[in-house]
Amino acid sequence: MRCSQLFYPTLREVPSEADVISHQWLLRAGFIRKTTSGVYTYLPLGYRVIKKITEIVRQEMDRAGGQEVMMPIVQPAELWQESGRWDVYGDEMFRLRDRHQRAYCLGPTHEEIITTLVDADVHSYRDLPLLLYQIQNKYRDEIRPRFGLMRGREFIMKDLYSFDVDQEGLQVSYEKMREAYNRIYQRLILSYRMVEADSGAIGGNASHEFMVLAETGESEIVYCDSCEYAANVEKAVCSPAAAGEAAGGRECGEMVTISTPGLRTIADLAEHMGIPAEEQVKTLFYTADQVLVAALVRGDRELNEIKLKNALGCNELLMADEALVRQQCGAGFGSLGPVGLKVPLYADLEVPLMAKISCGCNRDDYHYSQVKFGRDFEATAVLDLRSAEVGDPCPHCEGHLLKMRGIEVGHIFQLGLKYSLAMGAAYLDKDGQQKPFVMGCYGIGVSRTMAAAVEQNHDQDGIIWPLPIAPYQAIVVPVNANKAEQWEAAWRVYEQLKNLGVEVLIDDRDQRAGVKFKDADLIGIPLRITIGPKSLQENQVELKKRWESENRLIDIDQVAREVAEIIKQADQVLIG
RNA sequence: CGGGGCGUGGCGCAGCUUGGUAGCGCGUCUGAUUUGGGAUCAGAAGGCCGCAGGUUCAAAUCCUGUCGCCCCGACCA
């Protein structure tokens, strides 16, 4: 492809709407343009990357036994009413009506469609397991689209749905997908980590996320410094061993009331009363499906709302309104505590182990100290409610936890019977018995993966595409395309590369060399062959890898083969 | 939805407080000179200042409404 004909409008300046790295570079390099909030058009380079990613995903899905289907984007309300999700999904679903006022939505996901399909046409255990997948646009009317492709309202996603006869079958399908996912991210040459995850609203049992590691990631993950354990902080288990360390050795005397005028935060009390945060207890109020509840964690800990929500089994968990809390407890935020409280009280595992506790008094400007769990107050339940922190012991080994950030690009779930029961989807087993399908679902955010790849692979000059997903693998740059000698040499190399199956650009624009180098760097083409006047006299050209800083001089007749070889090696990862 | 900010040539911005016929840089087009890391000179095109009302002799500027976009929060692939 000639650069003079390629539609890749590059920008010198960062559009003001973009403030995350991937969004900035993808816009500047002419890969995407915004159509409306959270909805993007993929320009030729961007779409080539999307096609590269989907092709790798497709190959691995097929390899794992998946069969590709195409499902509708417009879905009837009835299917969603049947599964019960029409009402649950809320404002995040794009809803529409046809001319007859029948209700539809733009599919945010496809469990309902696929379950209905399989139920209608799969009747026997002989037809299972069945793995069906799709790679399509999906729609979620995000509360707030942001970060460019990272959180769009229209996005490209691969979803595979597995149907098995029983839990053991599901386990096998799940393992297949886990392996396929690992292969995919290795083939994409992205630095990633598989982590234990919360299964959220989609439901089900086991769940893993695939995180592309990046400073700018939205998700925080913890991992063990000595074993394979890794988990989303939402999910990470805080083992009792961690709590044990909080016990301390000091004796607890009688509960005393202390005057604490104007001291409202943990830090205030630590600073002015000399009470270390780890001897305080934080009392946090929530309304869980309209019911006021209180949660207790040690003063220096963070409450994990996901854990609390899961423990309560509620649909909606919101920070409680201060007026309501004052009405029920007699004090405002900053002076609240568990003693004498009449709302359901959920304590973190560490709370009962604390030697002595300081906490609010439920009376403004007063606190208690020398409080003890079990003596001065009880809890409705004692649970793992806090977020894991750096240095916590690993739940699986003697190691300790570390933290890093990641971009969630894949998520696999064991759904179990959730949808098959809700939608009455069943098969006949060997004994002629009706059994619900045991399902799994396995998603990959394709467009998000593209953004994540940029987030992880860039420098001050632009994108550095991993070879397997680069829009073009190589670019031939004659320093001066007007010099016949250079142009002819460049064209010859270009033709050779094409003949070797290399996806290659040739920069035939009448531009100064600097402009061409800047653009090549910006759009991130991995291999650049520069044809310059000096080296050409020696019958040599320069080969530069985008991810390295030095050039290498190569004989002009060798360069095409060399480039093809580098590409072949990158492709060799895991194929076969 | 709550809080904050912004809409002025393709992109980035100034002008608005104190109303008076719209400006800068980049990009684009023409020509010349250039040609190894975003060239130089000369010329040119391109904007009902988001939209709709209002105030005024006069509105990018003041007022009201409305639409869109971005950021922070609740949500998530």
Image (cartoon, helix red, strand yellow):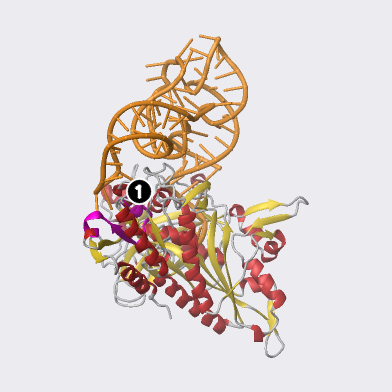
Residue shown at 32% from the left, 47% from the top = A515
Nearer to us in this view, A241 or A476: A476
Q: Position of residue A446 (x, y in %)?
A: 49, 63
The amino acid type, in three-letter code, at marker 1 is Thr
Nearer to us in this view, A327 or B64: B64
Residue B20 relative to residue B53: left or right: left
Residue A370 visible, this angle: no
Q: Quadrant of the N terminus of chain A?
A: bottom left
Q: Position of residue A141 (x, y in %)?
A: 57, 52
In this view, which residue lies farthest toward the bottom?
A431
Residue A368 relative to residue A343: left or right: left
Instruction: Classify residue A107 by image quadrant.
Output: bottom right
Residue shown at 26% from the left, 61% from the top = A542
Residue shown at 45% from the left, 59% from the top = A295
Q: Position of residue A330 (x, y in %)?
A: 47, 47
Would you place residue A158 above or below residue A367 in this image?
below
Would you place residue B4 above or below residue A249 in this image?
above
Q: Position of residue B49 (x, y in %)?
A: 51, 28
In magenta segment, residue A549 = no
In magenta segment, residue A518 = yes
Q: Which residue is mark 1?
A: A265
Residue B18 relative to residue A82: left or right: left
Residue A427 relative to residue A268: left or right: right
Helix, strand or loop for disc 1: loop
Q: Quadrant of the C terminus of chain A?
A: bottom left
Instruction: Classify residue A537 by image quadrant.
Output: bottom left
Q: Which residues are magenta?
A: A517-536
Mark 1 Cα-neighbour bin, 10 Å: few <14, some 14–19, many ≥20 = some
In this view, which residue lies farthest toward the front?
A484
